Image (tube, rainbow, N blue to C red):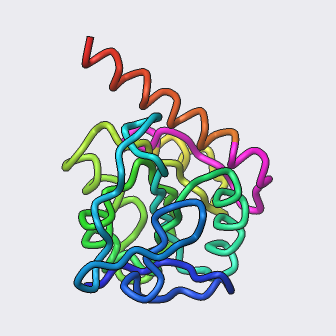
Amino acid sequence: MELLQLDDCGVTQPLSRVCTINHSGEPTVLSGRCQEIPRGPETGRDVERILVIDDDPGVQTAVRRTLEPAGYDIVAAANGADAMDIFREADPALIILDLRLPGKSGQELCREIREETASIPIIVLSALSDQAERILLLELGADDYITKPFSPRELLTRVRSAIRRLEASLHENLV
């Protein structure tokens, strides 16, 4: 399974064709895959990579247009069946997860991601606003829950907050 990323037009493309790993937008491709992300501040990267798991291209585009200008690199998975492979290859600092996905549900993905790592923040972005559903996802390991339609400013603020908490946690573990 090849990594996918949104191009400048908001179209999902194979990462080997787009492979933007820095805010300046210069592609870096090595043997059809991205080179190692340079390490820097925040969680040890110059650019924080965010995995967006959502089957709606409009949502992917909206998230991209919200987060890329703030310095985040966006990688997308359009279905639940491919999401875990893309998660393992992309090494994201944060995941934005829809619940209703073809191939595998967001609940299943949340559970599987938490079995592999407890440190990567997961923000659920879903049209489902049922309180019981939100509580279940938070109990399964999601860190936050935003309902669609969403405020771009709120999403950006919650992403920054989750990454700050991750950075603080990583710093505490080093001390």
In this view of the protein, which residue sits in the foreground, 91 or 135?
91
90 vs 139: above or below: below
In this view of the protein, which residue sits in the foreground, 69 or 124?
69
x 51%, y 57%: residue: 96
x 27%, y 46%: residue: 114
Question: Along the horizontal axis of the image, is 112 left or right of 148?
Answer: left
- Residue 144 belongs to magenta span: yes
x 60%, y 57%: residue: 125
Tell me the quarter of the image containing the N terminus. bottom left
12 vs 74: above or below: below
Residue 132: x and y in percent read 55, 45
Residue 143: x and y in percent read 48, 38
Tell me the quarter of the image containing the C terminus. top left
In this view of the protein, which residue sits in the foreground, 172 or 28?
28
- Residue 168 belongs to magenta span: no
In this view of the protein, which residue sits in the foreground, 58 or 5?
5
Residue 94: x and y in percent read 45, 49
Question: Along the horizontal axis of the image, is 84 left or right of 106?
Answer: left
Taking the view exactly as shown, the residue that stands out farthest to the left is 116
117 vs 20: above or below: above
x 40%, y 74%: residue: 28
Taking the view exactly as shown, the residue that stands out farthest to the top is 175
Magenta stretch in the rendered image:
138-156
